[in-house]
Image (cartoon, rainbow, N blue to C red):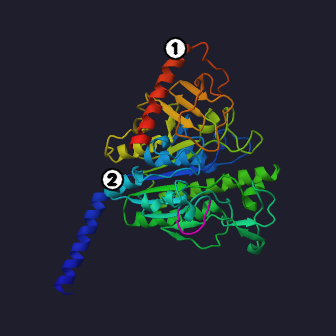
């Protein structure tokens, strides 16, 4: 072997060892999210029919949050809160299909990449369009160039992403003879279907179809390929997996519908697509174990908001008031789980309010990195909660969506709405609504059935003051920058 070649080989071996030493001890992070899954849509929450063994295992083997909140009662704002630790009213993502993730916002992926992390996004994005050139999904294409903000310009090395919703089975197809927009039976012959209109994209290139079968499995196939490659290189990873299930239209395969055949077809498909998604959660955790990285990998699961539809729809918030689009508890309190064998004891459980806003501060604390500037963060680190050293939040959670506002503390909640518009509007607004306020004791009355506003005026006034101060901070961020 020539001396130059030997020197190069030794150098590469040395650098490989140095790289592994630099990466050693850094935890991995996987953030899972379902879409429109209600507070009661899990087995561990006591659903009478729905089986979710993988989520039940996460609840038993990690931490179960009794009060976990999506930052908003609709999709896009919650997703922005996950990645930035900031309420989306600070940067203009007021509702679904409005605004986009602004370049000035710092995502978890952008903050971890300089620390040597590989970053990947898989599934639903919904924080901007993924193409400027062709019509795609809800807004993609020339008509919405100003909202182009895909994962690959927001810190993600690799992705397999859609702008918005897809069917939960055969994601590229809609049967020509579909029985309705909310659900349909899969077709065996693609010639009997038409394109649904939402594509998967990888770094600016559309993924050609057909993509057949369970959508959650298709997403996980790509995510696990990425995870396997990173684990083999001993490089730490940050992975976001945002399922489409159980967002409408819900479509499940025959095997996943079979356990629920006593129910209506709508419920069969709804329960079936959640069961299929749950299986992929279990598959992920098994693969992390096989790769030898499960011990120091934080895996979190939540939903982006409460269940879609009226009370007669398949999804449930149990006894909580409200559903998707509402800032009552049923619209924002969602399943919340965290598993991290190195840091969280099995069977842990907390009643402290936690939120999608807390992911970024928690991850930065875990890698011992400060936030790089002084812009306001709305989340807190959950590391002390993971170790049972903190049981009170001591920092309220603010909410604003369309014509509603809310402020949630450890015990009391202020809810305000423009009279007659408590369910929220389809589009958001940066302007605080004119509201009437209600006050609830969530520890004694989680279903929000007893308004204390008239009997506890001082408690109400103090919390309205905190809410308005937070609203003013959001307005300042929105109008003047970070």
Examine the structure image and report whether residue 63 is included in the region drawn in magenta: no
**Circle 1: is it few (<14), some (14-19), or many (20+) Cα within 10 Å?**
few
Examine the structure image and report whether residue 135 is included in the region drawn in magenta: yes
Residue that carries the numbered disc 2 in the rendered image: 25
Q: Nearer the viewer, residue 457 or 235?
A: 457
Residue that carries the numbered disc 1 in the rendered image: 458
Secondary structure beneath disc 2?
Answer: loop
Counting from the top left corner in percent of width and height, residue 135 is at 60, 66
Q: Nearer the viewer, residue 197 or 218?
A: 197
Q: Residue furthest left?
A: 3
Instruction: Kindly report which numbered mark, 1 or 2, lies closer to the viewer in this rendering.
Output: 1
**In the picture shown, does residue 333 fall above or below 20?**
above
Mark 1 vs 2, N-terminal side? 2
Does any portion of residue 285 appear in the rendered image? no
Does any portion of residue 422 appear in the rendered image? yes
Counting from the top left corner in percent of width and height, residue 219 is at 57, 62
Q: Quadrant of residue 95?
A: top right
Please give the name of the residue rendered at 50% of the width and 26% of the height, measured from the top-left corner: 410
- Region in magenta: 130-137
């Amino acid at each position: 072997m020539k001396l130059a070649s030997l020197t190069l080989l030794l150098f590469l071996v040395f650098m490989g060892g140095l790289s592994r030493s630099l990466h050693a001890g850094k935890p991995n992070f996987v953030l899972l999210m379902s879409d429109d899954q209600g507070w009661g849509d899990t087995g561990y929450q006591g659903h009478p029919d729905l089986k979710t063994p993988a989520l039940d295992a996460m609840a038993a083997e990690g931490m179960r949050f009794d009060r976990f909140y999506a930052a908003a009662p609709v999709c896009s704002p919650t997703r922005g809160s996950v990645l930035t630790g900031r309420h989306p009213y600070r940067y203009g993502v007021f509702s679904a299909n409005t605004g986009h993730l602004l370049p000035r916002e710092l995502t978890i992926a952008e903050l971890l990449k300089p620390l040597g992390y590989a970053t990947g996004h898989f599934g639903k994005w919904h924080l901007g369009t993924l193409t400027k050139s062709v019509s795609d999904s809800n807004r993609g294409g020339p008509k919405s160039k100003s909202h182009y903000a895909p994962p690959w310009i927001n810190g993600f090395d690799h992705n397999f992403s859609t702008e918005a919703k897809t069917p939960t089975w055969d994601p590229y197809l809609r049967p020509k003879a579909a029985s309705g927009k909310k659900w349909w039976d899969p077709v065996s012959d693609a010639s009997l279907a038409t394109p649904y209109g939402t594509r998967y994209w990888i770094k600016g290139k559309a993924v050609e179809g057909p993509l057949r079968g369970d959508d959650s499995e298709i997403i996980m196939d790509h995510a696990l390929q990425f995870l396997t490659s990173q684990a083999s290189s001993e490089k730490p990873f940050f992975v976001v997996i945002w399922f489409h299930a159980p967002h409408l239209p819900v479509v499940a395969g025959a095997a996943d519908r079979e356990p629920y055949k006593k129910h209506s077809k709508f419920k069969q498909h709804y329960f079936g697509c959640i069961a299929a998604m749950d299986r992929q959660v279990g598959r992920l955790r098994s693969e992390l174990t096989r790769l030898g990285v499960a011990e120091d990998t934080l895996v979190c699961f939540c939903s982006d908001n409460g269940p879609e539809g009226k009370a007669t729809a398949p999804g449930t918030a149990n006894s909580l008031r409200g559903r998707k689009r509402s800032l009552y508890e049923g619209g924002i309190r969602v399943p919340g789980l965290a598993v991290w064998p190195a840091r969280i004891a099995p069977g842990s459980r907390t009643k402290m309010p936690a939120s999608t806003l807390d992911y970024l501060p928690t991850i930065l604390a875990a890698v011992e990195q400060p936030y790089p500037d002084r812009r306001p963060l709305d989340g807190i680190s959950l590391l002390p909660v993971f170790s049972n050293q903190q049981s009170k939040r001591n920092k309220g959670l603010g909410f604003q969506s369309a014509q509603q506002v809310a402020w949630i503390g450890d015990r009391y909640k202020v809810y305000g709405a423009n009279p007659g518009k408590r369910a929220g509007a389809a589009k958001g607004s940066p302007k605080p609504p004119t509201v009437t306020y209600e006050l609830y004791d969530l520890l004694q009355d989680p279903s929000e059935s007893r308004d204390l506003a008239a009997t506890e005026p001082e408690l109400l006034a103090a919390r309205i003051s905190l809410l308005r101060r937070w609203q003013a901070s959001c307005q300042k961020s929105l109008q003047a920058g970070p």
